[in-house]
Image (cartoon, rainbow, N blue to C red):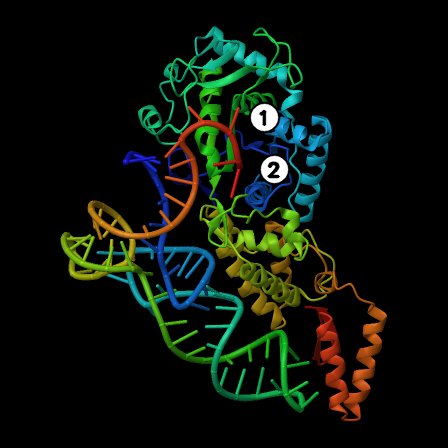
Amino acid sequence: MPQLTLHDSSSRTTVPFAPLAPGNVRVYYCGPTVYDLAHIGNLRAMITADILVRLLRHLYPRVTYVRNITDVDDKINARAHANGETIDSLTARTIRDFHDDLAAVGVLPPDVEPRATHHIGEMITLIERLIASGHAYEAQGHVLFAVAHFPDYGKLSGRSPDDLLAGARVEVAPYKRDAGDFVLWKPSAPGLPGWESPWGRGRPGWHIECSAMSHRYLGESFDIHGGGSDLLFPHHENERAQSQCCFPHSRFANHWVHNAMLLVNGEKMSKSLGNFLTIRDVLSDTPAEALRLLLLHAQYRSVLNFTRTGLDEAKQTLNRFYRAIGDLPPPDAADPVPAEILTAMCDDLNTPRALAEMHALADRALAGDHAAARGLRASGRLLGLLGQSSDAWFRAGAGVDEAEIDTLIAERLAARKSRDFARADAIRDDLAARGILLEDGPTGTIWRRA
RNA sequence: GGUCCGGUGGCAGAAUGGUGAUGCAGCGGACUGCAAAUCCGCGUAUGUGGGUUCGAUUCCCGCCCGGACCUCCA
């Protein structure tokens, strides 16, 4: 087994991964705030986590993967109000859609998916600890974390508190001791979600939920904490500060993994640019597996530019892989993942190199090497790809009457036999116009969707 | 303005102190009635100016360009 190395955002170096307890690798990822459909940027983070966890499961006997759901948030309150629906209705529907979308692109569910609203008690306990130890203070109904009381503040994201002050874009609330202090608990007006607490009826700040839930399910110190690079500051910096002040001798996350952002046609996704793509926007006219492959085409720490061309190329790559696999018998779990694939993945999740190796396997498989074909499929399993039959890949979504196509193919064959090529080509062209491509092989004519 | 990351062929995207993967697109050929698929072959790249070195795309510095973050965005 190759040694897994991972880039660690905290030290900004790529280091060998060593589990705190090899018998149980513990991973925490920041999940969605459930007020709207997940977009393809959210998906990139979820897929990065997915391939990391798949690899860890391959390398270690047990992995505990926790991914939370943020179901209390001002954006949720605002959206529910705008939609004229209850918060419960909005969050329940959004969670359902989120699960459906992730399942469609082959993202495996986490072992534990805790919801913030189910862990308010744990958050209050942590906040009380922070107040008791002098790391937090109450002011005008709010409870705030005092960054001045945590000397390491800024260390994770690599910035000094002074820098933060200099560039602060947001007006500082007057009740903060330091501009960098952030909310642990805030009062809730009647009509907004709220819970009774030692500081009155209120609701938690954003960061405390992850400290509470990671502690509940993974303990004071765990192996990997991940998310999008935009979460590094302030979210993860603040989480770390809270947790390490609550548990002074803990490491909190031993290793930090952050994926780079995704661009659409060279621009950051935003509502105002109108290039905001949800997962289901893309899946409306693209096989889910092509979307997944596209997101694996760049290494997770590189900015990835999402384009239609890229999606089409991903589809072509899958055509090639599925052709190489052909009608291999059902997956055999004993098929080993080829060493070169595992090596690439263990090199900080180098998916582009793994895909290049898969192309090499496909070359050999297409030349008749059955072992290579099985290796290709085993590689796909590690990446969450190639999980369907070739027939399903080539024919799904064609939306046609297969019996009719078979009839037309037979008719075309007869035309070709009688050398009526005009008729034969007309049939082929007609099917092509309907998105059905014909291929004449040594064993007869097969069809696939475009 | 501050901090950090990055600039590789037409496009996407790896790697490396010593002949720069892979895929798509393009070109030529085989196969095919013609295609498709497959196979064989070909061309094209390290932003820019210095430095270190026998040798730099790789390490260092300047410049230009792009991106992320700078208090609730994956």
**Foreground of the two, A79 or A241:** A79
**Residue nearest the observer in this picture, A249 or A407:** A407
Q: Are marks 1 and 2 in contact (CB under 8 Å)?
A: no
Q: In which quarter of the image is residue A92?
A: top right
Residue A317, placed above or below residue A380: below
Residue at 58 percent across and 6 percent down: it is: A198
Kind of residue at badge 2: Pro
Residue A242 image position (x, y, % from top left): 47, 19
Q: Which chain carries label 1?
A: A
Q: Judge left or right: residue A369 versus residue A14.
A: right
Q: Mark 2 lies on which chain?
A: A
| Residue highlighted by disc 1 | A74
Left or right of A114 in this view: A256: left
Name the residue carrying label 2.
A61
How many angstroms separate mark 1 from mark 2 (CA)? Answer: 40 Å
Task: Work out whether A187 lies above or below A393.
Answer: above
Residue at (64% x, 10% y) in the render = A196
Residue B3 point in image, percent of width and height: 31, 35
Q: Looking at the image, how many numbered discs can be counted on the residues?
A: 2
- Res A438 → quadrant: bottom right
Relative side of A53 to A441, left or right: left
